[in-house]
Image (cartoon, rainbow, N blue to C red):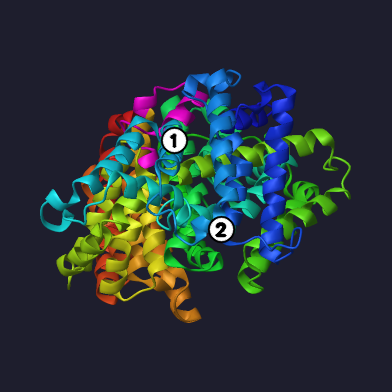
Amino acid sequence: MSEAPKQRKGALSRYDLMPKPVKAIFLSTTVIAIGLFCFHYMGIPIFGYVLSGVPYYYILFSCLGFNVFMGLAVHHYARHRPPPWYDYVLATILVTILIYFTFNSGIIAMRMWTPAPGWPQLVLAVIIGLISLEAGRRIGGWGYLTLLLVSIVYPLVADYMPGIFWGVKQSFNDIFSDFAFGANGLLGIPAMMIAELVLGFYLFAGVVMGMGGGDFFVKLATSVVGQFRGGPAKVSSLASAFFGTMSGSTIANIVGTGSFTIPAMKKTGYPPEYAAAIEACSSNIGDTMPPIMGGMVFLACVIAGVEYAQFIIAAVIPAFLYVFAMQIQIDAYAAKAGLKGLTRSECPPLIPTLKEGWIYIVVIAFLAFGLIYMRWGAIVPVYATILAILLAFTNKKMRPTWKKMEEALAHMAGLINFAVGVTFSMGFILVGLFKTGVAAAITSWIVSLGAGNAYFVLFIATGFSVVMGMVGLQRAAFLFLSVTAAPAIAKVLDIPIYVILLFIIYQAGYGTVTPPVAIDAYVAASIAGANPIKTSYTASRMLVPLLLVPFFFVFQPALAMVGTPWSIFYHLIMAMVGIFIMVCGTGGYFTGLGSIKPWERAFFISGGFLIAFPELFTTFAGGILSVIGIVLVLIRKMMEGRKGKENPAIAGGG
């Protein structure tokens, strides 16, 4: 447990290795950025001016630009080294150009620089574009950089492309000018996501984590499920769910909870690869666990023009079903392998644990209340952060100190760095899709392709997302599908687009554990001392049943809180029953029946899936298949019992 904070910071930034003056800049610019966000959101003037639009975006980027290259290492093995000289050069150039754009933001806001009026402006646009490509490479790797380069080259030859990929040709000037100064590039979705939505949430996450929230939720999960069979693995799943309510990051989940749960799983008999796979799959919920979800959800809010609160409401039941399915799967494995839980002495008592960490529960409840009921918007996390700090003074152990606040700010800055690095480079993909008109063409094609066959369209989207995820491009896959396939699927199924976007986010999460690029599995394997490839394959198999959960809430929006209370309750119960039976089938163990033979599993897997699938006929058919499976297992066990009585040697040997 004591290593978690150090690992967490190392995963997000190189803060500990920076010189003190750089640390001061690193933290102060982050605080200034949060302050600018608050002034902007509340409409408070600064020197007589209310920050908004293009000037606000460039000022904010100027504050955050320096930290991007201070926090993102050129290679993963360089994360444990101080920032080299060329990172200072890149950071300085980036900030200088952004400050220049800020002083010219009035002209830029009038779209006078699209295309760039002269070669000086074009050169600056190209430089900031190249720097953004490097930031994207540091986060997404060479595969992501390749995609970005394709997004730049494609508009140059769009008029030569066949079929639906034909588009309006763009010049080199058009591409880079629109990226740096236009509504499709930095000043579009990336700016709206960073400047209008996420900063307050990262502030909240950083402060709560710095106050020890991660340790509390691990203790809480241990006290609730630690003593049951497979206890450490169940703690991993539940702790990751708790952790996800405030982290919004899969990697942060793995490091924050895995440093405790993975060694505990290995101690109780789990193979290293399986322990790492459980942690990777459990932590996958970090991107979609309310109230603070991952960056893709924030991006989805901007794309769909939907309030973040709507995504929180829609994600509650799917997140619960995901954790429920993980718990059943873990229980089945533990029962087959004969794995026990933690001892009573190893599990902290529940009531004292709740008394110790009630502040975390209160502030998260306040956050949910402000977002969902009061609809105060993106400023709510700032209010929740202030409440958390005030309440912390009531507890000696949690009372804020300079060291704790420094760690909280460093964690927050690391989260913001990651988001800024991703969104900067994302602009090239958006320019390539929108400027050429290919996004609209692909949407129309998908509508015509899926007319009357929504299943086909969904499976195409899933397949594309999985394949892209296998090479580490799950975020790029989400961005592409969200602006092309999502509107088409929503139209075919006649359901809210945010439900489809949530579906795509879930499918994109699968790419974080699939080989050959499986970042979540590799991080978990490094903690477990396991083979990363074996861990990835194990996690991929484990996550297959959970891939089906998004299909349930797409075909029955009641599972995304769209419908009457009775409809929501009925379909939730059916989904739970179906998932329980299906996951028992995939796990090869049914509670009350014992182990299931391979040929018997088909009845439970298909029966459970059909029960959970939200149609009356399929539910009835699934019930029949499940009953047949149960009867077959009972008959087999009865026959085995008789053979055992007739031949005691067989019974004794069995």
Is disc 2 surrounded by few (<14), some (14 to 19) or many (20+) residues within 10 Å?
some
User: For this rendering, which residue is in front, 449 or 539?
Assistant: 449
Would residue 144 appear left or right of 259 to someone viewing this image? left
Looking at the rendered structure, the secondary structure element under dot 1 is: helix
Q: Please tell me whether residue 576 is drawn above or below residue 496 in the rendered image.
A: above
Q: Quadrant of residue 336?
A: top left
Pointer 2: what residue? 106
Amino acid type at mark 2? Gly
Would residue 19 appear left or right of 387 to someone viewing this image? left
Looking at the rendered structure, the secondary structure element under dot 2 is: helix
Would residue 236 appear left or right of 595 to someone viewing this image? right
User: x, y percentage for residue 494?
Assistant: 31, 76
Q: Is residue 11 visible?
A: no
Residue at 89% across, 42% down? 396
User: For this rendering, which residue is in front, 125 or 263?
Assistant: 125
Prevalent SS, magenta region = helix
Residue at 49% across, 34% down? 339
Is disc 1 surrounded by few (<14), some (14 to 19) or many (20+) residues within 10 Å?
some
User: x, y percentage for residue 58?
Assistant: 57, 50
User: For this rendering, which residue is in front, 354 or 177?
Assistant: 177
